[in-house]
Image (cartoon, rainbow, N blue to C red):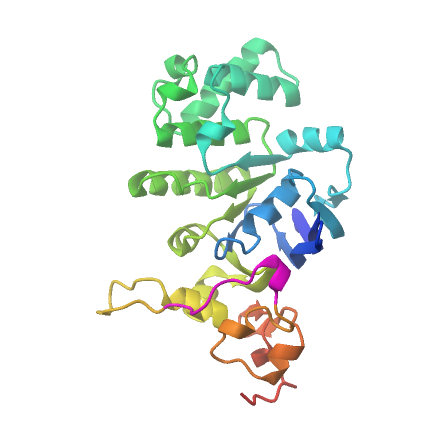
Amino acid sequence: MSLLEVQNLVVEFPTRRGTLRALDDVSFSIAPGEILGVVGESGAGKSLTGASIIGLLEPPGRVASGQISLEGQRIDNLPHEKMRHIRGRKIGAIFQDPLTSLNPLYTVGQQLVETILTHLPMSAAQARQRAVDLLKDTGIPAAEQRIDHYPHQFSGGMRQRVVIALALAAEPQLIVADEPTTALDVSIQAQIIQLLKNICKTRGAAVMLITHDMGVIAETCDRVAVMYAGRVAEIGPVHEVINQPAHPYTVGLMASIPDMEQDRERLNQIDGAMPRLNAIPKGCAFNPRCPKVFDRCRAERPDLMPAGATQAACWLHDAKSEVSA
Protein backbone atom coordinates (compact mmCIF):
# COMPACT_ATOMS: atom_id res chain seq x y z
CA MET A 1 0.00 0.00 0.00
CA SER A 2 1.44 3.39 -1.01
CA LEU A 3 1.45 6.23 1.48
CA LEU A 4 1.95 8.89 -1.20
CA GLU A 5 0.68 8.50 -4.74
CA VAL A 6 1.51 11.09 -7.43
CA GLN A 7 -0.36 10.43 -10.68
CA ASN A 8 0.22 12.23 -14.00
CA LEU A 9 1.10 15.50 -12.24
CA VAL A 10 1.26 18.55 -14.52
CA VAL A 11 2.35 21.94 -13.13
CA GLU A 12 2.06 25.03 -15.29
CA PHE A 13 3.11 28.66 -15.02
CA PRO A 14 1.00 31.06 -17.07
CA THR A 15 3.14 33.91 -18.51
CA ARG A 16 2.50 36.77 -20.93
CA ARG A 17 4.09 34.73 -23.70
CA GLY A 18 2.01 31.63 -23.08
CA THR A 19 1.86 28.83 -20.54
CA LEU A 20 5.09 27.11 -19.47
CA ARG A 21 4.81 23.48 -18.45
CA ALA A 22 7.27 22.94 -15.60
CA LEU A 23 6.21 19.39 -14.63
CA ASP A 24 4.88 17.15 -17.35
CA ASP A 25 3.07 13.93 -16.43
CA VAL A 26 5.08 13.01 -13.32
CA SER A 27 4.01 9.78 -11.56
CA PHE A 28 5.52 7.86 -8.63
CA SER A 29 4.58 6.45 -5.24
CA ILE A 30 6.27 6.07 -1.84
CA ALA A 31 5.48 3.30 0.65
CA PRO A 32 5.54 3.75 4.47
CA GLY A 33 9.10 3.49 5.79
CA GLU A 34 10.61 3.98 2.33
CA ILE A 35 13.06 6.68 1.25
CA LEU A 36 12.64 7.77 -2.37
CA GLY A 37 15.45 9.88 -3.76
CA VAL A 38 14.66 12.44 -6.46
CA VAL A 39 17.73 13.49 -8.40
CA GLY A 40 18.57 15.57 -11.47
CA GLU A 41 20.27 18.76 -12.62
CA SER A 42 19.11 22.21 -11.53
CA GLY A 43 15.85 23.00 -13.29
CA ALA A 44 14.78 19.35 -13.66
CA GLY A 45 11.67 19.92 -11.54
CA LYS A 46 12.76 18.21 -8.30
CA SER A 47 11.94 21.02 -5.88
CA LEU A 48 8.78 21.90 -7.79
CA THR A 49 7.53 18.33 -7.32
CA GLY A 50 8.21 18.64 -3.58
CA ALA A 51 6.49 22.05 -3.39
CA SER A 52 3.43 20.63 -5.18
CA ILE A 53 3.15 17.81 -2.64
CA ILE A 54 3.53 20.15 0.35
CA GLY A 55 1.03 22.58 -1.20
CA LEU A 56 3.55 25.43 -1.39
CA LEU A 57 3.65 26.17 -5.12
CA GLU A 58 4.63 29.79 -5.74
CA PRO A 59 1.87 31.63 -7.64
CA PRO A 60 1.21 31.84 -10.56
CA GLY A 61 2.34 28.17 -10.59
CA ARG A 62 -0.58 25.75 -10.35
CA VAL A 63 -1.36 22.05 -10.58
CA ALA A 64 -3.01 21.94 -14.01
CA SER A 65 -3.89 18.24 -14.03
CA GLY A 66 -3.12 14.92 -12.38
CA GLN A 67 -3.51 14.29 -8.68
CA ILE A 68 -1.60 13.81 -5.42
CA SER A 69 -3.01 11.42 -2.81
CA LEU A 70 -1.84 10.86 0.77
CA GLU A 71 -3.15 7.72 2.48
CA GLY A 72 -5.76 7.43 -0.27
CA GLN A 73 -7.04 10.99 0.26
CA ARG A 74 -6.57 13.49 -2.55
CA ILE A 75 -4.69 16.58 -1.28
CA ASP A 76 -3.82 18.67 -4.37
CA ASN A 77 -7.27 20.32 -4.56
CA LEU A 78 -7.81 21.10 -0.87
CA PRO A 79 -8.57 24.66 0.31
CA HIS A 80 -5.64 26.55 1.85
CA GLU A 81 -6.76 26.12 5.49
CA LYS A 82 -7.23 22.35 5.21
CA MET A 83 -3.89 21.95 3.45
CA ARG A 84 -2.20 23.99 6.17
CA HIS A 85 -3.40 21.51 8.78
CA ILE A 86 -2.23 18.51 6.73
CA ARG A 87 1.14 20.18 6.07
CA GLY A 88 2.16 20.15 9.70
CA ARG A 89 0.23 17.09 10.85
CA LYS A 90 0.74 14.57 8.06
CA ILE A 91 3.53 16.07 5.94
CA GLY A 92 6.73 17.49 7.43
CA ALA A 93 9.10 19.63 5.36
CA ILE A 94 12.87 20.08 5.66
CA PHE A 95 14.40 22.78 3.48
CA GLN A 96 17.91 23.49 2.25
CA ASP A 97 18.70 26.53 4.38
CA PRO A 98 17.72 26.11 8.03
CA LEU A 99 17.94 29.86 8.62
CA THR A 100 15.01 30.53 6.30
CA SER A 101 12.90 27.83 8.02
CA LEU A 102 13.36 29.22 11.53
CA ASN A 103 12.04 32.52 12.88
CA PRO A 104 15.02 34.49 14.29
CA LEU A 105 12.79 36.35 16.78
CA TYR A 106 11.67 33.26 18.71
CA THR A 107 13.58 30.61 20.64
CA VAL A 108 13.64 27.16 19.04
CA GLY A 109 11.53 25.96 21.98
CA GLN A 110 8.80 28.50 21.30
CA GLN A 111 8.69 27.45 17.64
CA LEU A 112 8.57 23.74 18.46
CA VAL A 113 5.93 24.15 21.18
CA GLU A 114 3.73 26.27 18.89
CA THR A 115 3.87 23.61 16.16
CA ILE A 116 3.11 20.79 18.62
CA LEU A 117 0.17 22.64 20.21
CA THR A 118 -1.26 23.48 16.77
CA HIS A 119 -1.43 19.85 15.71
CA LEU A 120 -1.52 17.64 18.81
CA PRO A 121 -3.93 17.65 21.78
CA MET A 122 -1.43 18.46 24.55
CA SER A 123 -0.96 20.88 27.42
CA ALA A 124 1.82 23.50 27.18
CA ALA A 125 3.94 21.52 29.68
CA GLN A 126 3.55 18.28 27.70
CA ALA A 127 4.39 20.13 24.50
CA ARG A 128 7.56 21.54 26.02
CA GLN A 129 8.61 18.09 27.21
CA ARG A 130 7.95 16.70 23.73
CA ALA A 131 10.05 19.53 22.25
CA VAL A 132 12.97 18.61 24.54
CA ASP A 133 12.62 14.94 23.59
CA LEU A 134 12.61 15.83 19.87
CA LEU A 135 15.79 17.87 20.26
CA LYS A 136 17.41 14.91 22.05
CA ASP A 137 16.20 12.50 19.34
CA THR A 138 17.77 14.65 16.65
CA GLY A 139 21.11 14.65 18.44
CA ILE A 140 21.23 18.07 20.09
CA PRO A 141 23.28 17.90 23.31
CA ALA A 142 22.02 19.58 26.51
CA ALA A 143 18.55 19.85 24.98
CA GLU A 144 17.01 21.13 28.25
CA GLN A 145 19.20 24.26 28.03
CA ARG A 146 19.36 24.63 24.25
CA ILE A 147 15.58 24.70 23.92
CA ASP A 148 15.60 28.32 25.17
CA HIS A 149 18.26 29.47 22.70
CA TYR A 150 17.61 31.42 19.50
CA PRO A 151 18.40 30.05 16.00
CA HIS A 152 21.52 32.25 15.63
CA GLN A 153 23.04 30.56 18.68
CA PHE A 154 23.21 27.23 16.83
CA SER A 155 25.74 26.13 14.21
CA GLY A 156 24.55 25.22 10.68
CA GLY A 157 24.42 21.49 11.41
CA MET A 158 22.63 22.00 14.72
CA ARG A 159 20.13 24.38 13.09
CA GLN A 160 19.33 21.71 10.51
CA ARG A 161 18.69 19.26 13.37
CA VAL A 162 16.26 21.78 14.87
CA VAL A 163 14.49 22.00 11.49
CA ILE A 164 14.24 18.19 11.40
CA ALA A 165 12.82 18.22 14.95
CA LEU A 166 10.30 20.84 13.76
CA ALA A 167 9.36 18.66 10.78
CA LEU A 168 8.81 15.69 13.12
CA ALA A 169 6.93 17.66 15.77
CA ALA A 170 3.45 16.40 14.88
CA GLU A 171 4.56 12.86 13.91
CA PRO A 172 3.93 13.20 10.16
CA GLN A 173 3.71 10.11 7.93
CA LEU A 174 5.59 11.80 5.08
CA ILE A 175 8.68 14.00 5.15
CA VAL A 176 9.67 16.02 2.10
CA ALA A 177 13.37 16.88 2.46
CA ASP A 178 14.58 19.36 -0.17
CA GLU A 179 18.40 19.37 -0.35
CA PRO A 180 18.63 18.99 3.47
CA THR A 181 22.42 18.53 3.50
CA THR A 182 23.61 20.91 0.75
CA ALA A 183 24.52 23.79 3.05
CA LEU A 184 26.45 21.53 5.46
CA ASP A 185 30.00 20.19 5.47
CA VAL A 186 30.55 16.53 4.67
CA SER A 187 30.92 15.11 8.20
CA ILE A 188 27.69 16.84 9.30
CA GLN A 189 26.00 15.65 6.07
CA ALA A 190 26.65 12.05 7.06
CA GLN A 191 25.10 12.58 10.50
CA ILE A 192 21.97 14.24 9.07
CA ILE A 193 21.56 11.41 6.54
CA GLN A 194 21.88 8.82 9.31
CA LEU A 195 19.27 10.74 11.27
CA LEU A 196 16.81 10.65 8.34
CA LYS A 197 17.36 6.89 7.94
CA ASN A 198 16.75 6.28 11.65
CA ILE A 199 13.53 8.32 11.50
CA CYS A 200 12.27 6.08 8.71
CA LYS A 201 13.11 2.91 10.61
CA THR A 202 11.79 3.91 14.02
CA ARG A 203 8.72 5.92 13.00
CA GLY A 204 7.76 4.17 9.76
CA ALA A 205 7.64 7.56 8.03
CA ALA A 206 8.13 7.83 4.28
CA VAL A 207 10.75 10.29 3.05
CA MET A 208 11.04 12.04 -0.30
CA LEU A 209 14.66 13.16 -0.46
CA ILE A 210 15.37 15.77 -3.14
CA THR A 211 19.05 16.25 -3.96
CA HIS A 212 21.53 16.55 -6.80
CA ASP A 213 24.12 14.48 -4.92
CA MET A 214 24.23 10.86 -6.09
CA GLY A 215 26.46 9.96 -3.13
CA VAL A 216 23.70 11.00 -0.72
CA ILE A 217 21.17 9.01 -2.78
CA ALA A 218 23.35 5.86 -2.81
CA GLU A 219 23.88 6.10 0.95
CA THR A 220 20.30 6.83 1.95
CA CYS A 221 17.57 5.78 -0.44
CA ASP A 222 15.67 2.59 -1.26
CA ARG A 223 14.54 3.77 -4.67
CA VAL A 224 15.51 6.71 -6.88
CA ALA A 225 13.67 8.77 -9.48
CA VAL A 226 15.90 10.56 -12.00
CA MET A 227 14.25 13.72 -13.36
CA TYR A 228 14.98 15.59 -16.56
CA ALA A 229 13.15 18.64 -17.97
CA GLY A 230 10.07 18.18 -15.78
CA ARG A 231 9.64 14.45 -16.34
CA VAL A 232 10.80 11.23 -14.66
CA ALA A 233 13.47 9.79 -16.96
CA GLU A 234 14.13 6.66 -14.88
CA ILE A 235 12.88 5.17 -11.61
CA GLY A 236 13.86 2.01 -9.79
CA PRO A 237 15.80 0.47 -6.88
CA VAL A 238 18.88 2.55 -6.04
CA HIS A 239 21.34 -0.30 -6.54
CA GLU A 240 20.03 -1.04 -10.03
CA VAL A 241 19.84 2.57 -11.19
CA ILE A 242 23.41 3.25 -10.03
CA ASN A 243 25.00 0.04 -11.31
CA GLN A 244 22.91 -0.66 -14.40
CA PRO A 245 21.33 2.62 -15.51
CA ALA A 246 18.86 2.13 -18.36
CA HIS A 247 18.32 5.71 -19.57
CA PRO A 248 21.19 7.43 -21.48
CA TYR A 249 20.80 10.48 -19.20
CA THR A 250 21.23 8.32 -16.07
CA VAL A 251 24.22 6.64 -17.74
CA GLY A 252 25.76 10.09 -18.25
CA LEU A 253 25.02 11.13 -14.66
CA MET A 254 26.69 8.01 -13.30
CA ALA A 255 29.73 8.40 -15.57
CA SER A 256 30.27 11.94 -14.29
CA ILE A 257 30.79 10.75 -10.69
CA PRO A 258 34.44 10.31 -9.65
CA ASP A 259 35.36 6.66 -9.06
CA MET A 260 37.88 5.99 -6.30
CA GLU A 261 39.00 2.72 -7.87
CA GLN A 262 39.73 3.98 -11.36
CA ASP A 263 42.55 6.26 -12.36
CA ARG A 264 40.97 8.73 -14.73
CA GLU A 265 42.46 11.98 -15.95
CA ARG A 266 39.07 13.50 -16.76
CA LEU A 267 35.48 12.95 -15.73
CA ASN A 268 32.88 12.27 -18.38
CA GLN A 269 30.41 15.04 -19.03
CA ILE A 270 27.04 15.31 -20.73
CA ASP A 271 27.41 17.85 -23.53
CA GLY A 272 24.90 20.67 -23.78
CA ALA A 273 22.47 21.91 -21.13
CA MET A 274 18.97 21.19 -19.95
CA PRO A 275 16.42 22.91 -22.24
CA ARG A 276 14.56 25.99 -21.05
CA LEU A 277 10.86 25.51 -20.35
CA ASN A 278 9.91 27.54 -23.41
CA ALA A 279 12.20 25.53 -25.68
CA ILE A 280 11.68 21.86 -24.79
CA PRO A 281 12.37 19.88 -27.99
CA LYS A 282 9.83 17.67 -29.68
CA GLY A 283 9.97 13.97 -28.83
CA CYS A 284 12.25 13.00 -25.96
CA ALA A 285 13.50 16.16 -24.19
CA PHE A 286 16.97 14.62 -23.86
CA ASN A 287 17.37 13.89 -27.60
CA PRO A 288 19.70 16.84 -28.49
CA ARG A 289 22.21 15.66 -25.84
CA CYS A 290 21.74 11.91 -26.23
CA PRO A 291 24.57 9.78 -27.69
CA LYS A 292 22.09 7.05 -28.70
CA VAL A 293 19.45 9.23 -30.35
CA PHE A 294 17.53 7.87 -33.38
CA ASP A 295 14.61 9.13 -35.48
CA ARG A 296 11.78 8.07 -33.18
CA CYS A 297 13.35 10.01 -30.27
CA ARG A 298 13.00 13.26 -32.23
CA ALA A 299 9.35 12.66 -33.09
CA GLU A 300 7.65 10.85 -30.19
CA ARG A 301 7.89 11.40 -26.44
CA PRO A 302 8.42 8.13 -24.54
CA ASP A 303 6.61 7.26 -21.29
CA LEU A 304 8.16 5.13 -18.55
CA MET A 305 8.48 1.51 -19.69
CA PRO A 306 10.10 -1.61 -18.22
CA ALA A 307 13.88 -1.54 -18.71
CA GLY A 308 15.48 -4.48 -16.91
CA ALA A 309 15.12 -3.96 -13.16
CA THR A 310 14.03 -0.31 -13.51
CA GLN A 311 11.62 1.73 -15.60
CA ALA A 312 12.96 4.22 -18.12
CA ALA A 313 11.33 6.75 -20.45
CA CYS A 314 13.48 5.73 -23.41
CA TRP A 315 12.65 4.20 -26.80
CA LEU A 316 15.73 1.96 -26.58
CA HIS A 317 13.65 -0.29 -24.34
CA ASP A 318 10.66 -0.51 -26.64
CA ALA A 319 10.60 -3.71 -28.71
CA LYS A 320 8.96 -1.86 -31.62
CA SER A 321 11.79 0.68 -31.92
CA GLU A 322 14.02 0.08 -34.89
CA VAL A 323 17.32 1.63 -33.88
CA SER A 324 18.43 3.65 -36.88
CA ALA A 325 20.67 6.47 -35.82
Location of residue 321 in the rendering, given as x and y in whole percent from the top left corner = 62, 85
Q: Which of 247 and 175 is in front in this view?
A: 247
Residue 145 counted in the magenta span: no
2 w.r.t. 92: above or below: below
Is residue 246 visible in this depiction of the protein? no
* In the displayed structure image, the side of residue 58 where residue 112 appears, left or right: left
- Whether residue 271 is in magenta: the answer is yes
Please name the residue shown 47% across and 60% down the image.
Answer: 238
Residue nearest the viewer, comparing 108 with 131: 108
Residue 295 position within the rendered picture, expressed as x and y whole percent measured from the top left: 60, 84
Which residue does the image show at 46% across and 67% down from the upper left?
A: 272
Taking the spot 61% from the left edge, 63% from the top edge, the residue there is: 279
Q: Is residue 98 visible?
A: yes
Where residue 263 appears, x then y in whole percent?
Answer: 21, 69
Residue 29, quarter of picture: bottom right
Above or below for 241 versus 67? below
Magenta-drawn segment: 269-280
Residue with the most extreme front position = 16
**Does the magenta stretch mainly form a helix, a strand or a loop?**
loop
Percent across and percent down for residue 25 are 69, 60
